[in-house]
Image (cartoon, grey):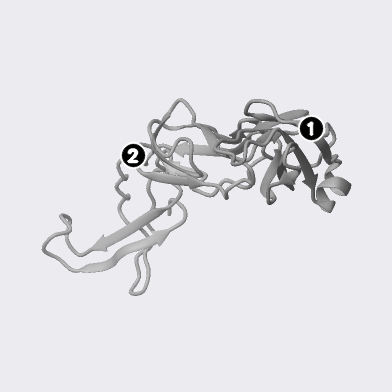
Amino acid sequence: LGASPVVCQSVTSASISYSNLQNTPDQYFIDYSDTANTSGGFVDVGVTTLGASPISLSVPVAAPVGTYDGTLYVVNSTLSCRSVGIPFTVTVTDTPSTPGTISGSATVCHDTSGVTYSIAAVSGATTYTWDVPANATLVGGQGTTSITVDWGAAGSGNITVNAGNTCGTGADRSLPITVVAGAHAASVASVARVVSETSIIASWSSVSGATGYRLDVATTEDFQAGTFVVENQSVGGTS
């Protein structure tokens, strides 16, 4: 027999090809499994004239998604003999479901390359379609469960993905993305005030796009020859 058929749910017909049958059979019949009969609604086929390949199969319109077993027998009516059973399956499938959560960074810096986003495989899906915002370039992985993205200018948008097969395309899954601009050059702190043996108070102007600051305090103006009193100290505000 040829390949077992795969049909979309609510499609009511399928076919299976055959070749090189021995003893010149002229009839056939099909016995479906008990599960195919009771759960899928498949009806056994009585002795029927065997025409040219392929053999047409009736698929119940309400058959649930699943794989159903059948056995084909061919008969030579003149010799009153039949073949051994030839197993096959009928698989009923449907449009894939919505993908699960998209994994990957939801906040990235502008001009960042090689960021990966992925989903778990969706049952029944044979392909995946990804879409990225205008400020991004999808550089690899289209059609699979994992992509690589290069980010450009600051902005916001959504990465979306859906799963598909021969029956159609499922609903989109989205991940909102924020691309942030890099901080501008750091401002220089004003002359320290309220200086004591154990502390100083210094302040500086805020920098657009910055979410924090790092402070250096040295014993020389050029930060070269002297000694660092404070080096790369994380500071949340502007003083």
Q: According to the image, label 2 marks what residue?
A: 184
How dense is the environment of label 2, judged by Cα within 10 Å: few (below 14), some, or many (20 and up)? few
Picture coordinates of residue 180 (x, y %)?
44, 38
Q: What amino acid is labelled 2 in the image?
A: His
Residue 114, image x, y percentages: 36, 44
Q: Which residue is mark 1?
A: 48
Along the horizontal axis of the image, is 204 left or right of 123?
A: left
Depth check, front residue: 47 or 77: 77
**Foreground residue among 13 and 11:** 13
Q: Is residue 54 above or below residue 201?
A: above
Q: Residue at the bottom extreme?
A: 197
Q: Quadrant of the C terminus?
A: bottom left
Query: Residue 152 location, x and y as percent?
Result: 38, 32
**Left or right side of 82 for 176:** left
Instruction: Tell me the SS state at disc 2.
Output: loop
Residue type, numbered disc 1:
Thr
